[in-house]
Every structure is written in C-alpha cells, then in structure tokens.
Amino acid sequence: MLKKKLLVVALASVFAAPAMADDFTPSSNVSLVSDYLYRGISQTGALPALQGGFDLAHASGLYAGVWGSSISWVSDAGLANSAGVELDTYAGYKGAAADIGYDVGFLRYNYPGSYVSGVTKPDTNEIYGALSYSIVTAKFSYALGDTFGAPDSKGTTYAELNAAYAIPDTGITVAGHVGAQTYKGSSAKYTAFIAAGTPSYTDYKLSVTKDFSGYVAGLAFSSTDASAYYTSVTAQAKKLGKGTAVLSLSRAF
C-alpha cells in the first residue's frame, strides 16, 4: 500500500512539473548606451557601457532577476584598485487593484572588485514600492544601510515620478521623469568626490524610443541640479551630473 501511495505521489509530481513550469516566464535583455546614467549621475565618466539582464516572473506576480553593466566610477573615484562591473540582484511582487498597479521589492547593488583599505564599499541594499495609474508611475526607494559608498547614510531615499506614453501604431514611446535623491546621516558623503555642496539633488529626464522589429533605439536628455560634490577626482574632474544626451540600443528576448 505504501509503495502504491509513493508511486501516485511521484506520478502526480511528474505531471504537475510542466504545469508549474508554465507559470514561470523567463526574459532577458541587452543594451548598449553612450553613457550609463543612474538617477542622473554618470556611472562611466561619460563613456559608453554594455548592459544586460535576466528576469524570471511567476504568474502569481512574484519576480526575481539579475542585471549588470560596465562602470568606471568606483575605480575613477579611488575607492577600488579595480571594480569595473555593477551587478544588481532583485526580487519583488507586482499586481493590480482595480486600475491601480503596485510593485514592491528588494534590490541589492553589487560592485565586485579589489578595494582600497578603509573605504566604505558602495554595495547598497534598498527596498522600494511603486504605484501606477494609466501612464504615470510614482516610486519610492529606501536605503537599508550605507548608500553607494557614503558612510552613515542609512535612510537615504529616492522619490521619483515617471510618465510614459506609447503613440499608437508607431512603435514610438515618449517619456518623462523627475526624481529626488535625499541623503541622510551626519557624514553622508563619498570619500571619492570633491566635498563641495550637498550630496542631495534632483534629476530630470525626457526620452523617446522607437521599436524597430524588436530592436529599440532611444534618445534621452538628462540633467540634474547636483553640486560639485558629484565631480570625479580622478576622471579628469568631470561633472558627473551635468546635462547630457544619451543614445541607446536595446533588445529584449
């Protein structure tokens, strides 16, 4: 009798496995950008970056993924002897209640490399929540500890408002963004940058993309009111938050 029960369970598992697999949707993406801007601040010293990621979404709304990009700011800043990659991991849950969409999750920014002794590593943990209605999305991110190399900066936040409109039958999407990065803590500063002015700032972006049979080309203009605090020490004293145009080409699979 026990063997028969075990056989029934085993057979049920075999037939259930494909159904469970059908509940998961994998996807991946790759991009080439003329400048990797994150929250309006260049991560590559105004140079191009190669990026890509992989996501796995469940029918229930749960999702997880990993995303990476080439960077230079950590080494340019003198924090590391070598650290040329950003590798992010994240997981969350998204769904909808009537016409309101919601998304909550956890995101870890990883910057693997060989670091200078005594510096605060830029690895950062954030939780986030977002609400969307029609073409508008509002999102709030909260840092759980030191933020992007700034010591004693737990509680740093980033609030943003985004809008995107897909023009029917054209493959063209126009979008706008405004965000506010607000640092917390008594010594919230990078050891890597010229400490002039506040690390808190506001960024703005307008963009347009065009889908060419799965290949998406984009043009964006981004600007910030970031102070000289975001001037790189070793990368030819570049202003990393200045107004700039960014070209991109991406493909999702």
Image (cartoon, rainbow, N blue to C red):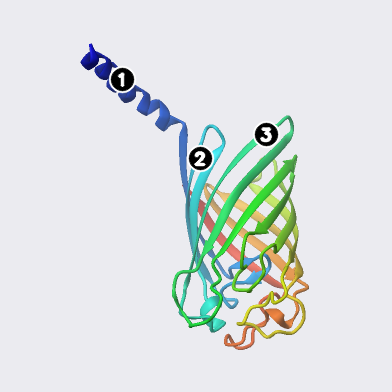
Q: Element under label 2?
A: strand
**Tag 3 or tag 1, which sits nearer the N-term?**
1
Q: Determine whether label 1 and label 3 are within 8 Å by CB.
A: no
Q: Left or right? Give the position of 108 relative to 142.
A: left
Percent x, y for residue 192? 60, 82
Q: Dividing the picture into quarters, in which one does residue 44 lie?
A: bottom right
Q: Residue furthest top?
A: 1
Residue 76 appears in which quarter of the rendering?
bottom right
Residue ID for mark 3: 96
Distance between the alpha carbons at the discs numbered 3 and 2? 15 Å
Residue 152 falls left or right of residue 34: right
Query: Disc 1 residue type?
Result: Val
| Front one among 207 and 68 | 68
Q: Sort mark 3 into few (<14), some (14-19) or many (20+) by Cα contacts within 10 Å.
A: few
Residue at (48, 83) in percent of width and height:
117
In primary-sequence order, the first of circles 3 and 2 is 2
Against 249, is 148 above or below?
below
Of residues 101 and 12, the one drawn nearer to the viewer in this rendering: 12
Task: From the image, state whether disc 1 or disc 3 is nearer to you.
Answer: 1
Residue depicted at x 31% and y 20%: 9
Residue 185 picture location, percent across and down: 71, 71
According to the picture, the residue beneath numbered tag 2 turns out to be 57
Label placed on residue 9: 1
Instruction: Indicate the secondary structure of the residue bearing disc 3.
Output: strand
Q: Is residue 29 visible?
A: no
